[in-house]
Amino acid sequence: MPNLLVFAGTTEGRELLEALSPSIAGRGLTVTACVATDYGKELLRSGLDHIQVRSGRLTEEEMTVLMKEKQFDYVIDTTHPYARLASENIKAACKQAGCEYIRVLRSSGANQQMACLFFSNHDEVVEYLNQFNGNVLLTIGSKELSKYTRVKDYQKRLFPRVLPMLEVVESCYVLGFTGKQLICMQGPFTSELNIALIDQIKAQFIVTKDSGETGGFLEKYHAAVETGATLLVIGREKVEEGISPEALLELLENTYHIALRTQDKTDLGHWFPVFTKITGKTIVVVGAGKIAKRRIETLLKFDCCIRVVAPEALPAVIAYADEKRLELRRKPYEDADLEGADYVLAATNHKQINHEIYETCKEGNIPVNVADDKEKSDFYFPGIIRKKGITVGVTAEGRDHVLAKKVTRAIADCLDNQS
């Protein structure tokens, strides 16, 4: 009888099980899922029919016994990319039991062009933090927290964000992380929530792993850029061999003759690339922080009138105003600031103000881009390349920021090499 074992507990594992559940009825295919904790079991969506879920950490020997007993066709490892010991045990157990091992890979969220500092391990991060003062938001989980007790004044400076599980909280208390220093929350975390936490604890540094897009890396990166905090990234120690989630679904479809993916192959886009003439148009940017600055610097490459409204502005934005390249209103936003606007960018640090701008634009039929809510945006800024009289816009429609950045750089390099 066809038989699968899935080591889950991650986003990739949950999505695989949810795809399998409605597809295996009546096909004689059985699926067993293993998660490390009861909490991990609770996170799985209810109604996973025909799937047996087991909770509790298994040793290599216990894995081997289970695999020999069930004789799985495939053992699918979707554990976290930093759970190296778990993957090693699963792989070793498969070898002993004679089961085929498949490692599902999570794409990296970081690249060397990002404004981050990269480290090989936690010890290097600790050494770096000891050279500076300032509060630190730790988003590395709880297993490696003991290493950070070597950071000077760690009980005052460090704010670990961990899962709200009793055993996790107890282990943090033993290490001296208590009270307001301990943030117990379950993700996923938006950029806005990360920004709020950074502002609340006045963090100057954020420590994270390269947990990929599904692990919330980009939301941390954008929050660091917006707040000016330094992002310290612990890279993956080695390149793993394995397959992507998409390739796994294709393999299972072909092996068991089941449909796991959306069968509509047309991949209809939602954002049509229109080149609109903005000569003489007034574009109002509300906000003058880092995100607004990037938008302004893009607009300065085009023939348009830029009006910036913000009570405070970055020095670069002030300099552009001094050079008469834009109009800067150093004041709190009011609806009157949108008078005569052809396009509006709501790029403040305050979600409520951005929403108010959105509502005003909707009433006035003004196209608006809301920096912290793509669903409210009539347009948004793609990756823009403007070289040698050629203008190119690149977007992945929010699905793969890393790929979009790579494509943007590749096109720019191609244009640079044209004679």
Image (cartoon, rainbow, N blue to C red):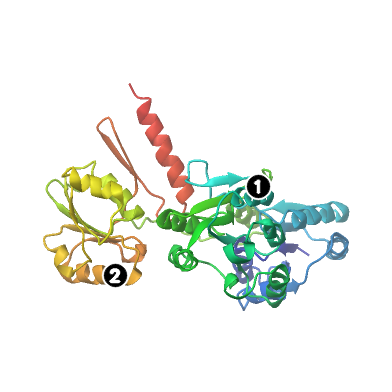
Nearest the viewer among 191 and 174 is 174
Q: Is there a contact, CB below 8 Å, between mark 2 and mark 1? A: no
Say which mark, if any, is on residue 193.
none
Going by the numbered disc 1, the residue's amino acid type is Glu
Nearer the camera: disc 2 or disc 1: 1
- On the question of residue 265 being in view, the answer is no
**Circle 1 residues within 10 Å: few <14, some 14–19, many ≥20:** few
x then y, percent, for residue 252 = 65, 57
Instruction: Give x and y (percent) for residue 396.
Output: 41, 51
Position of 302 relative to 86 (above/below): above
Q: Residue 353, labelled with which disc?
A: 2
Callout 1: SS:
helix
Residue type at the position of mark 2:
Ile
Query: For mark 2, does the 10 Å Cα neighbourhood hold few (<14), some (14 to 19), or many (20 or more) residues?
Result: some
Q: Position of residue 264 (x, y in %)?
A: 46, 59
Residue 415 spot, x, y in % from top left: 35, 30
Between discs 2 and 1, the one toward the N terminus = 1
Figure check: 387 above or below 277: above
Q: Quadrant of the N terminus?
A: bottom right
What residue does disc 1 label?
A: 124
